[in-house]
Image (spheres, grey):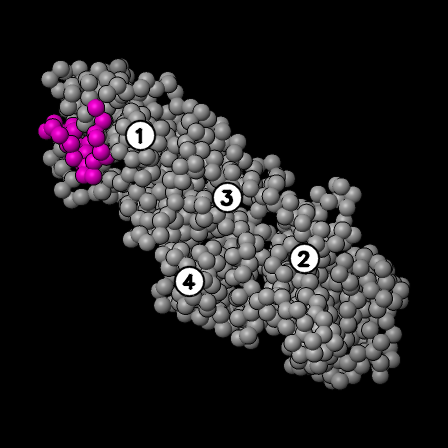
C-alpha cells in the first residue's frame, strides 16, 4: 500500500464542498425503518425566508456533533430537516417583491398572491437547506419537510377540528396585540418591549354634579381618552370613596361616564384615579367585563382615528396625541406633563408600536393542555438541560393565557371554518363543505390563517406522518432530543409539549438541551446596525467549517453566552493544520516502512507490539473515548472539545509522534511502529469526527487509500472505551518520560541563565504572577486562540518548574 502525498497545508475550501456533495448524493444519513436502537431528533425549522446566521450554525453544530456521535455508536439515527413557512415574514418579503413590480396584494387578490408566494418559495426558499448541506449537516434529506406540505397541512386541520370539537378552540371578541403595519394580531410572545422615556399626562375630568371640581387622572396615552367609558378609583382609597357612583365628563367628547370602584386603581400610582378604556387596554378590558361597561374603539386597523373620534377622525394616532394634548391645554384640562419611564411594546417582525385592539379572533383554551404538559414534565418524561430551564417552563405555564391563534394574513394554513350568512351557522371541518348542512345555503371560508407556531407545535409528530400510523411515527416518536435556544422555549418548546402530550399521549422528546446565545467578542448582541455580525458563510470560507464548528463547541458551556471572536477560529484552523501535518508525517513514515492501514477500524483500542509507547497511546485513546462518551452524554460540548484538543495537540502530536521518530529510524522497529501509528491515527480520527467531519473524512479516506472498511468514516464505529484498555504501567512510564524531558528542558534553560539566583528567583516570581493573572482573566481565556492560551499555560508550567528547581538547589557557604 502506498499512501498519497498530502498538500503542505490543509485546504478546507477545496476539500469541504467535495465531501458535502458526496454525503448528500450518497444518501449517507438516511435512517431505515424496522431497525433496532432508534434515535431521532427534529430540526428547529428555520424560516423559509432565512439565510444561515451564527445562531443557526451554533445550533446545527451542536446537533450534528450529537447525531454523528450517536450514529457512530451504532444507533439508527434520524435527524429530520425542514423549514417553516414563516407567515408574517414570508408575506412581507413577497409583498415587497410585488411592490417592486408595481403590484399590491389587495389588487391582485388572494389566489394570485398565494401563487406568487409559492413561486417565491420555489425560487428562493431552499437557500438555507443548501447552506446546511454545504456545512455538512448530516440530515436525512430524503425526509425533508415544510410546514405547508400537504401531509403537515392535513395534520394541522385534524388538530384544529379535534380541539374545536373538544371545546378547546373558540371564536370571540377580545382585546389583542395588534400590529398596524402587518395588520394582524400578534401573540404576547411576539411583542418586544423597549424601555423608553415617555410622558405622563395628568388630565382633569370635571365632576358633573359638583361644578368647579374635578378628578385628576394620569395617562400615558391621551389619544385614547376619546374611548373612555369610566374612571376607576380604589374602593379602599379614602380620598375618593365618596365619589364612587358619581359622573364625570370625558374631556373633549361631551360624554359623561361613571366613577367606579375597582382595584385596578392603585392609590400609590399617579393620582390614584385611572381612566377605563376597554377598547384599547387589556387591563381595562378585564375591568370593563367585571363592570359590564361598553367598549368603544377609536383606532382602526392602521392606527388612524375612526369616525367615532369626531374632529380627530383620520389622524394617525401620534398626530392625534399632539392635537389632543394641545386642545386639553387650551381648555385648561391639562394639569401636568412630566417625563415617565415606560416599556413600549413593538412588533417583533417590523418593530411598529403595538396597539391593543378589540377584534374577533380564534383562541385555544390553553389551561387543560398546559396542565397535562406540566404533569408530563413532573413525571420525568422530559429532562431539561440545564435544569434551570425546567423552572422557567413551570413559571411560564403557571401564568399562561389563552392563545390567540388567528392571523389576518394570506400566507399560511387557512383556518378550516366556514360561515353561513343565511342561518348564521359556523362549520369547522377537515374538508371544505359544499353547502351549509343546516339550511343548504352558500358558505364562505374564514379568511384568517393560523399562527405559524400552531403548525410548528405539531412538528415532532406531523413530520413523521401523524395522524396516520406510519412506520416513521412508530420508529422515531417520541424523539430522543431537542436542541434549541432559550428564545423559543415558550414560543415553541412549551407548545410542542402541550400539543404532543394531548394528541399522542406522550411528550414529543425525552430531553431538551437549551443552548447559549452567540454574541460578539464584547458580549453585545449581534446586529447589522452595530456592524458586529459575524457571517458564518464568510468565516467558514476563511477558516474552514471544521475550525468554526470546533470554536462553537469549545465555547458552548451550558448557561454561558458565547463571546465569539475570529481569533478563536484562527487558532482552531491552526489546530486542523497541525493534524493535517501529523497525517503527512504518518503517511510518509508508513510509506518508508512499507506499513499498511488496518483492514478494518479496530473495535478495541489495542495494537500489536509490546513497546510502552504503543501501549500508552492506545491507553490514552481509551481514556479519551471514555471522556468523550461522558461529556457528550451530558451535552458538555466544551469539555469534549477541550479533551480532543489536548489529546491531539499535546499527547498525540507533541509526545507520541516525537517518541515514535527514533523507532521509525530503527529498522527492527520501523514496521510495527508505523503500523501502530496508522492504527492509532485511525482511532483518533474517529474520535474527532463528530466535531470536525470534513478534515477527518479526508484523512481517513487517505489513511485507507481507497480500500476503506466503510463508505465513510461517519458510518464506522466510534472507539469503545473498555476497562481492559487502561494500561497503568504504560501511563506511568509515559509520565516519567515527560517529567524527565521537562526537567532536561529546565536544565538547559537554567544553563543559559547567567543572572544570580536571587535575581532569577525574583524575576521568575514576577513572571509567574503575570502569567497567572493573564490566565485568570476570563476574557483572555475565552477570546484568545486556543493555541495561544495553551502556550501560555505551558509557559507557566515551565516557569513554575524553574522556580521549583531554584528552590531545590543546595545552598553553599561563602
Question: Could you tell me residue 126's position as x and y percent?
Answer: 55, 42
Magenta region, residue range:
596-619
Mark 1 — residue? 700
Mark 2 — residue? 409
Relative to 505, residue 261 above or below: below
Label annotation for residue 469: 4
Mark 3 — residue? 55
Q: Identify which residue is drawn at 74% across, 54% down.
A: 109
Q: Nearer the viewer, mark 4 or mark 1?
A: 4
Looking at marks 2 and 1 on the same chain, the residue that comes earlier in the sequence is marked by: 2
Mark 2 Cα shell of 10 Å, populated few (<14), some (14-19), many (≥20)? many
Question: Could you tell me residue 372's position as x and y percent?
Answer: 44, 70
Q: Is residue 774 left or right of residue 723?
A: right
Q: Identify which residue is drawn at 59% across, 69% down.
A: 429
Which of the 4 quarters of the picture holds residue 330?
Answer: bottom right
Q: Is residue 745 magenta?
A: no
Q: Nearer the viewer, residue 368 or 317?
A: 368
Amino acid at each position: 500500500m502506498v499512501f498519497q502525498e498530502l498538500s503542505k497545508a490543509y485546504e478546507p475550501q477545496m476539500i469541504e464542498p467535495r465531501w458535502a456533495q458526496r454525503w448528500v448524493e450518497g444518501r449517507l444519513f438516511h435512517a431505515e425503518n424496522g431497525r433496532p436502537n432508534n434515535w431521532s431528533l427534529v430540526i428547529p425549522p428555520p424560516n423559509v425566508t432565512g439565510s444561515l446566521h451564527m445562531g443557526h450554525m451554533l445550533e446545527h453544530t451542536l446537533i450534528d456533533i450529537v447525531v454523528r456521535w450517536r450514529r457512530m455508536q451504532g444507533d439508527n439515527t434520524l435527524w429530520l430537516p425542514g423549514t417553516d413557512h414563516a407567515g408574517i415574514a414570508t408575506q412581507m418579503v413577497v409583498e415587497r417583491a410585488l411592490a417592486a413590480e408595481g403590484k399590491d396584494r389587495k389588487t391582485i387578490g388572494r389566489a394570485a398572491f398565494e401563487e406568487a408566494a409559492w413561486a417565491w418559495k420555489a425560487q428562493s426558499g431552499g437557500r438555507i437547506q443548501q447552506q446546511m448541506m454545504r456545512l455538512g449537516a448530516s440530515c436525512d434529506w430524503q425526509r425533508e419537510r415544510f410546514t405547508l406540505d400537504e401531509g403537515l397541512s392535513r395534520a394541522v386541520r385534524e388538530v384544529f377540528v379535534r380541539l374545536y370539537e373538544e371545546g378547546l378552540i373558540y371564536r370571540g371578541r377580545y382585546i389583542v396585540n395588534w400590529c398596524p403595519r402587518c395588520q394582524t394580531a400578534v401573540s404576547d410572545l411576539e411583542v418586544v418591549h423597549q424601555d423608553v422615556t415617555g410622558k405622563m399626562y395628568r388630565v382633569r375630568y370635571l365632576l358633573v354634579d359638583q361644578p368647579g371640581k374635578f378628578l385628576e387622572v394620569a395617562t400615558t396615552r391621551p389619544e385614547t381618552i376619546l374611548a373612555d367609558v369610566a374612571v376607576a378609583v380604589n374602593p379602599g382609597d379614602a380620598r375618593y370613596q365618596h365619589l364612587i357612583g358619581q359622573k364625570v365628563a370625558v374631556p373633549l367628547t361631551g360624554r359623561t361616564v361613571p366613577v367606579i370602584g375597582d382595584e385596578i386603581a392603585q392609590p400609590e400610582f399617579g393620582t390614584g384615579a385611572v381612566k377605563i378604556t376597554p377598547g384599547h387596554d387589556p387591563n381595562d378590558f378585564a375591568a370593563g367585563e367585571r363592570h359590564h361597561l361598553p367598549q368603544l374603539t377609536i383606532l382602526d386597523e392602521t392606527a388612524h382615528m375612526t369616525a367615532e373620534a369626531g374632529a380627530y377622525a383620520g389622524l394617525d394616532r401620534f398626530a392625534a396625541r399632539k392635537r389632543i394634548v394641545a386642545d386639553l391645554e387650551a381648555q385648561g384640562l391639562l394639569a401636568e406633563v412630566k417625563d415617565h419611564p415606560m416599556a413600549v411594546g413593538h412588533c417583533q417582525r417590523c418593530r411598529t408600536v403595538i396597539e391593543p385592539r378589540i377584534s374577533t379572533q380564534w383562541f385555544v383554551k390553553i389551561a387543560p393542555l398546559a396542565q397535562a404538559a406540566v404533569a408530563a414534565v413532573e413525571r420525568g418524561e422530559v429532562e431539561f438541560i440545564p435544569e434551570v430551564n425546567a423552572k422557567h417552563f413551570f413559571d411560564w405555564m403557571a401564568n399562561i393565557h389563552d392563545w390567540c391563534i388567528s392571523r389576518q394574513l394570506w400566507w399560511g394554513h387557512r383556518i378550516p371554518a366556514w360561515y353561513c350568512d343565511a342561518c348564521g351557522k359556523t362549520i369547522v371541518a377537515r374538508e371544505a363543505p359544499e353547502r351549509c348542512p343546516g339550511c343548504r345555503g352558500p358558505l364562505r371560508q374564514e379568511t384568517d390563517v393560523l399562527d405559524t407556531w400552531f403548525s410548528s407545535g405539531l412538528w415532532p409528530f406531523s413530520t413523521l406522518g401523524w395522524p396516520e400510523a406510519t412506520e416513521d411515527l412508530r420508529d422515531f416518536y417520541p424523539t430522543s432530543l431537542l436542541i434549541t435556544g432559550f428564545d423559543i422555549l415558550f414560543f415553541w418548546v412549551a407548545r410542542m409539549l402541550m400539543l404532543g402530550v394531548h394528541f399522542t399521549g406522550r411528550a414529543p422528546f425525552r430531553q431538551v438541551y437549551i443552548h447559549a446565545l452567540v454574541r460578539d467578542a464584547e458580549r453585545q448582541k449581534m446586529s447589522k446596525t452595530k456592524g458586529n455580525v459575524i457571517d458564518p458563510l464568510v468565516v467558514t470560507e476563511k477558516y474552514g467549517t471544521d475550525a468554526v464548528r470546533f470554536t462553537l463547541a469549545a465555547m458552548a458551556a451550558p448557561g454561558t453566552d458565547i463571546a465569539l471572536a475570529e481569533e478563536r477560529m484562527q487558532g482552531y484552523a491552526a489546530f486542523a493544520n497541525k493534524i493535517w501535518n501529523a497525517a503527512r508525517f504518518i503517511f510518509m513514515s508508513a510509506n518508508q516502512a512499507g506499513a499498511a492501514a488496518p483492514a478494518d477500524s479496530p473495535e478495541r483500542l489495542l495494537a500489536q507490539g509490546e513497546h510502552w509507547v504503543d501501549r500508552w497511546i492506545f491507553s490514552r485513546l481509551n481514556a479519551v473515548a471514555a471522556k468523550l462518551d461522558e461529556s457528550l452524554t451530558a451535552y458538555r460540548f466544551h469539555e469534549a472539545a477541550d479533551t480532543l484538543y489536548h489529546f491531539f495537540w499535546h499527547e498525540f502530536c507533541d509526545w507520541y509522534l516525537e517518541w515514535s521518530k527514533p523507532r521509525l529510524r530503527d529498522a527492527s522497529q520501523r514496521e510495527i511502529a508505523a503500523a501502530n501509528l496508522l492504527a492509532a491515527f485511525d482511532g483518533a480520527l474517529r474520535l474527532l469526527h463528530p466535531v470536525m467531519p470534513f478534515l477527518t473524512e479526508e484523512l481517513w479516506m487517505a489513511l485507507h487509500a481507497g480500500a476503506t472498511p466503510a463508505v465513510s468514516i461517519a458510518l464506522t464505529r466510534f472507539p469503545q472505551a473498555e476497562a481492559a484498555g487502561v494500561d497503568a504501567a504504560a501511563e506511568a512510564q509515559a509520565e516519567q518520560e515527560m517529567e524527565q524531558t521537562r526537567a532536561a528542558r529546565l536544565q538547559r534553560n537554567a544553563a543559559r541563565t547567567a543572572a544570580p539566583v536571587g535575581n532569577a528567583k525574583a524575576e521568575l516570581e514576577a513572571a509567574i504572577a503575570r502569567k497567572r493573572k493573564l490566565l485568570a482573566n476570563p476574557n483572555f481565556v475565552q477570546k484568545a486562540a486556543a493555541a495561544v492560551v495553551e502556550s501560555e499555560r505551558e509557559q507557566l508550567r515551565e516557569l513554575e518548574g524553574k522556580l521549583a528547581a531554584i528552590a531545590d538547589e543546595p545552598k553553599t557557604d561563602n
